[in-house]
Amino acid sequence: MQLSDKGAVIIDLKFERRDVDQALAGSLAGRQVLHASDKSTDLSSASYAFLWKPDPDLFQRAPNLKILFSGGAGVDSILATPGLPDIPIVRFVDQSLTTRMSEWVVLQCLSHLRQVPAYLVQQRSRTWREISQPEARELTVGVMGLGVLGQDSARKLKIMGFNVIGWSRTAKTVESIETYDATELDAFLARTDILVGLLPLTDETRGIFNASLFSKLRQGGALGTPVFINAGRGGSQVEKDLISALESGTLGGASLDVFEREPLSSDSPFWSMDNVIVTPHAASASDVRALLRNAEVQMERFEKGEPLQHVVDRATGY
C-alpha cells in the first residue's frame, strides 16, 4: 500500500489479484491503493475508483469519490449500480484494446468467409471435401457501432478486401466507409452479409439483435445466408431469437464473444452448434497495466485543473 496526500484509489476490477498487484508495482506511485474486495477496508478517503461490475454498496462505502474509471470498454454495469454519484465516468480508450478487438473481428469474418466452422466439422469426421469459398470482395460486412472500436474494425476489414458499411444511431463520417444512421437501419441490413455488433448497451440497443432484425439481413449473397458476429454487449442480443434464426437457416452462422448471462451456462445450445464460434468475453481483454497508465494521465489532468478525456455521456450511455 502506498501512502501520500495524493488522492487515494479504489481497485474493483475483474482481474486476478496477483495480476493487479504486479501492475501496481510500476503504477500509481505515491497514491494509497485500496481494494474494494477487502470488506473491512475503509474506502471513505478514496478520490478515484477503477470499476468493472461494482458491488451495490460500493458508493456507500466510498462517499467522497471524484472520478470513476471504467475497467473495460463498456460502462453499462457502472451506470446500473445503485447510488451512482453525479461525478465523471471515464471510458477506457487504449490502442491495445482497440487493436485486440479489430483482430478478433477480422479473424471471425475471415473464419466464416473461408468456411472454418464447416471444415472443423469435416476434420472431426475425417472428411476430405473442398467447400466453395467466396472472396472477401464478394461480401458486404455491416458494422453496427461506429465508436473507436467500430471504426478501427471497419478500416481493417476494408484492408482485407471486404466491402464495408457502417451504422450508428447518429450520422457519422468515416473515410472510405459508407455510413447509415438510425433512420436507415433497414437499408443498411438489406445490404449486409456479415453483421458485426460493436454497440454499447443502452436503452435503445438492449435486445436490438432480435428475430425482426435478423430477418432483414441480405439472403442469397455469396455465403448463401448471413452471419452474425457480436463482441459488443450480451444484452444487445435476444438469444432465443438468435438460436431460432441459426436453427431455421435465417442465419448461416455466428461468432459470439458476449452473452445475456456470463459465464455462458454449460447447457447453452451455442456450445454444440457446429456453425457457431464461442469465445469467453475475450475478444478485447483489457490490459490492467494499460488501464492504470491511462487513468494516471486523467488523474494528473484533473489535479492540474485540465479537462478530462473520454468522459461518458450519461444521456447516451457511452
Image: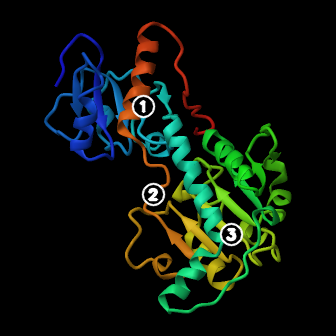
Which of marks 1 and 2 precedes in the sequence? 1
The CA distance from mark 2 to mark 1 is 20 Å
- What's the mark number on residue 281? 2
Q: Position of residue 184 (x, y in %)?
A: 84, 52
C-alpha distance separating marks 3 and 2? 22 Å
Residue 113 - label: 3
Label 3, label 1: how far apart the Cα atoms are: 38 Å
Q: Does residue 296 show up?
A: yes
Q: Using the image as rendered, state which of residue 120 and residue 318 is in the foreground.
A: 120
* Residue 278 locus on image (x, y percent): 49, 68
**Residue 210 rendering spot, x and y as whole percentages:** 66, 67
Quadrant that contains the C terminus: top right
Q: Secondary structure at mark 2?
A: loop
Image quadrant for the N terminus?
top left
Instruction: In the rendered view, tell whether residue 31 sits above or below residue 208.
Output: above
Label 1 crowd (10 A; few <14 / some 14-19 / many >=20):
many
Q: Return the disc, 3 or 1, that comes first in the chain's sequence.
A: 1
Tell me the quarter of the picture where residue 136 sits: bottom right
Which comes before the other along the chain, label 3 or label 2? 3
Q: What residue is shown with label 1? A: 69
- Mark 1: which amino acid? Phe
Q: Are marks 3 and 1 in contact (CB under 8 Å)?
A: no
Observer able to see residue 232: no
Point 63% across, 90% down: residue: 129
